[in-house]
Amino acid sequence: MATQLASKRPPLTPGRKRLRRRSAFAGYLFLSPWLIGFFCLTAGPMVASLILSFTDYDLFNRPEFLGFDNYTRLFKDPSFIQACKVTGLYVIIGTPLKLLVSLAVAMLLNNEHRMRGFYRSAYYLPSLIGGSVSVAIVWKAMFIDHGVIAQIGQMFGGDGTGWVGNPKLTLPMLILLTVWQFGAPMVIFLAGLKQIPQELYEAAMVDGAGAFRKFFSITMPMLSPVLFFNLALETIHAFQIFNSAFIISNGTGGPARSTLFYTLYLYFKGFRDFEMGYASALAWVLVIVIGIVTAILFKTSNAWVYYSGDAK
């Protein structure tokens, strides 16, 4: 059938060919700003960093080829192991907490009540300024000795000591910061909740289902594609934390390397110690790890993500 239709098409005349070329040229012309930016600012630097990851390069002298020495050095570097531990804890603890809070608030805002537009805007506001240096500075000021949080703790018998100088509390402080910035996933969850047919809840209510049964049998399955999207996105963002860790630790990764995140250590090696080859190797290991984690999420999503119309 397709071959018969193709045979009935009129042959391309010189005028039609010129029109097609002009249309293609116009399309590439409009795409050219993005293409130039991609090749010059993204693809080019990525290829350069991949090449540099096999060299010894300090930004001032010519790169010297080392082979895989930079990659084998990683696993003997105690600071690399510490950075992996700190970042792993941040991702494993902070991402689920952020999604849990954002889903809970989205379900509250999904109800009909007065000033719901104001509350949605107010809860989303931290995400608009999230990741900025100013937010990290204010957050640090709240948790220093005799800061707002320490003063609140004194009301309950605390000694006024802040969290910033305590190695056991700096990572929880940064996790609280990322949880506080739950606005973006909240809005996505809220949009997903709006798409769930109310008839399902009405039928469950007729059958006598309670709130927990409706949540786990209707809300979560229908919301699972949105949950998967938020989980993948927030996991990738968590691996890339830098600004808040740099500001709160005064650019040191302290105290006692408790805030030595992977990106912060990469920055130290590249722009403080001028070991750009080693920093490039660190960057590509991070890319590979994020790719593996994302691939695992996509692979396991078949077991728990439900799409409307699926046979399962």
Image (cartoon, helix red, strand yellow):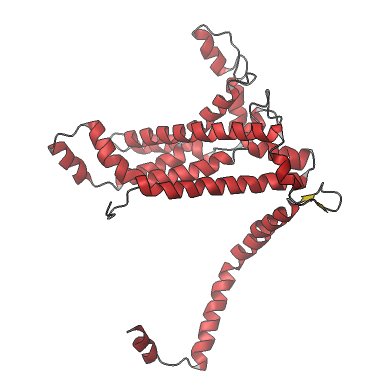
In the image, what residue occupies the spot 16% across and 37% down? 205
Percent position of residue 259, x then y: 64, 29
Whether 144 is drawn above or below 182: the answer is above
Judging depth in this view, the residue of 276 and 237 nearest the camera is 276
Viewed as shown, does residue 93 lie left or right of 247?
A: left
Viewed as shown, does residue 209 lie left or right of 304?
A: left
- Quadrant position of the N terminus in the picture: bottom left
Of all residues shown, which one is farthest toward the left? 206
Whether 245 is drawn above or below 309: the answer is above
* Residue 134 visible in the snapshot: no
Viewed as shown, does residue 66 lie left or right of 223?
A: right
In the image, what residue occupies the spot 65% across and 19% down? 165
Viewed as shown, does residue 169 lie left or right of 253?
A: left
In the image, what residue occupies the spot 30% across and 48% down? 195
Percent position of residue 312, x then y: 28, 51
Whether 7 is drawn above or below 205: the answer is below
Percent position of residue 76, x then y: 71, 36
* Residue 109 visible in the snapshot: yes
Image quadrant where residue 142 sits: top right
Whether 225 is drawn above or below 215: the answer is below
In the image, what residue occupies the spot 43% across and 36% down? 99
Judging depth in this view, the residue of 104 and 23 nearest the camera is 104
Percent position of residue 86, x then y: 60, 31
